[in-house]
Image (cartoon, helix red, strand yellow):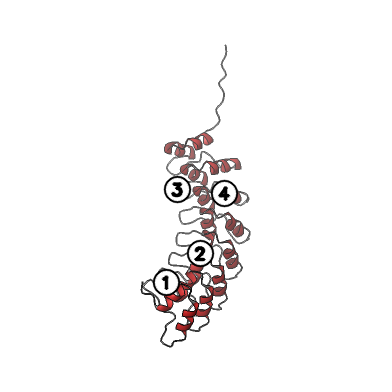
Amino acid sequence: MGDTSLAWAAWNGHEAVVKLLLERDDINPNKPNSGGQTPLMRAAYNGHEGIVKMLLGRDDVNPNKPDQGGETPLMWASWYGHEGVAKVLLGQGDIDPDKPSGSGKTPLLRAAGNGHEEFVKMLLGRDDVNPNKSDNRGQTPLSCAAGNGRAGVVEILLGRNDVNPNKPDKVGSTPLHYAALGGHGEVVEILLGRDDVDPNASDEDDQTPLWWAAYRGREGVVRILLRRGDAIPDKLNKYGETPLSCAARIGHARVVALLQPPTSAAHGTA
């Protein structure tokens, strides 16, 4: 990958070697490998806090330099939940904590999707981080956390007044859609505990969270949505299919049993 000696030492956490190399005048501390990853990024990726401090102690190390995918050192730290590295990076006056990658994902979205609760709190404590900032697909940190079943992160995000719990992505899917699709009952319960979450929100194909739960055979989520009372069980999508007919087509027998309307007992005369 074209890593320098400094990058290899940073990657493997060899602080003494990094110190020796940085004392040389002919060492470029920002030199990237073939993927655009710098020594700082390599250290951040593996959570080597001491080396990150050492590198950032120099005036010629750029804390925001991205790799070829647009991922910054902070982004990699957020991916793996390296809180110590994040504190060092966020302590830099010139750090951009909301800088998106090439796919539009921010450090907050990465941390939220991977369930790093303390990391999420750290980023949300800053005024320069937008909690609703979406990626190139329109997914927000909340929808990403919901889709991955990160209940703790969902609660943290919903604890803020400026987080939109119904914000759809580019195909109209809301955080509730993502939670239902993934079968994450605890997250569905948390979202439905709010008065401002629409259980019948429709995506671009007029498919509701209940439709997606039925499609995937998520029996537990179907029960939760039906228990809510205002989820419409026979809502048609744009192709004329209801959650019941969808579950029947695929063969999710238990979901079909839940969605069937009650039958009236026949009363005959002798």
**Residue located 40% across and 76% down the image:** 32
Count neighbours of disc 3 (C-alpha within 10 A) and say few if under 14, some if 14 to 19, many if 20 or more.
Answer: few
Q: Label 4, secondary structure: give it.
A: helix
How far apart in space, not on screen, are marks 4 and 1 (Cα)?
36 Å
Q: Position of residue 105 (x, y in %)?
A: 48, 64
Horizontal relation, residue 86 to residue 34: left or right: right
Residue at the spot of label 4:
188
Q: Which residue is mark 3?
A: 205
Kindly report which numbered mark, 2 or 1, lies closer to the viewer in this rendering.
Answer: 2
Of labels 4 and 1, earlier in sequence is: 1
Hey, what amino acid is under mark 4? Val
Marks 2 and 4: which is nearer the front?
2
* Residue that badge 2 annotates: 80
Percent of width and height locating residue 77: 51, 68
Distance, label 2 to label 3, CA atoms, is: 35 Å
* CB-based contact (under 8 Å), mark 4 and mark 3: no
Going from N to C along the chain, the mark reached first, 2 or 3, is 2
Q: Label 3 vs label 1: CA separation?
A: 37 Å
Front position among marks 3 and 1: 1
Quadrant of the drawing holding the C terminus: top right
**Image point 63% across, 59% down: which residue?**
159
Q: Check disc 1 and give the amino acid type.
A: Asp
Residue, disc 1 = 67
Question: Element under label 3?
Answer: loop
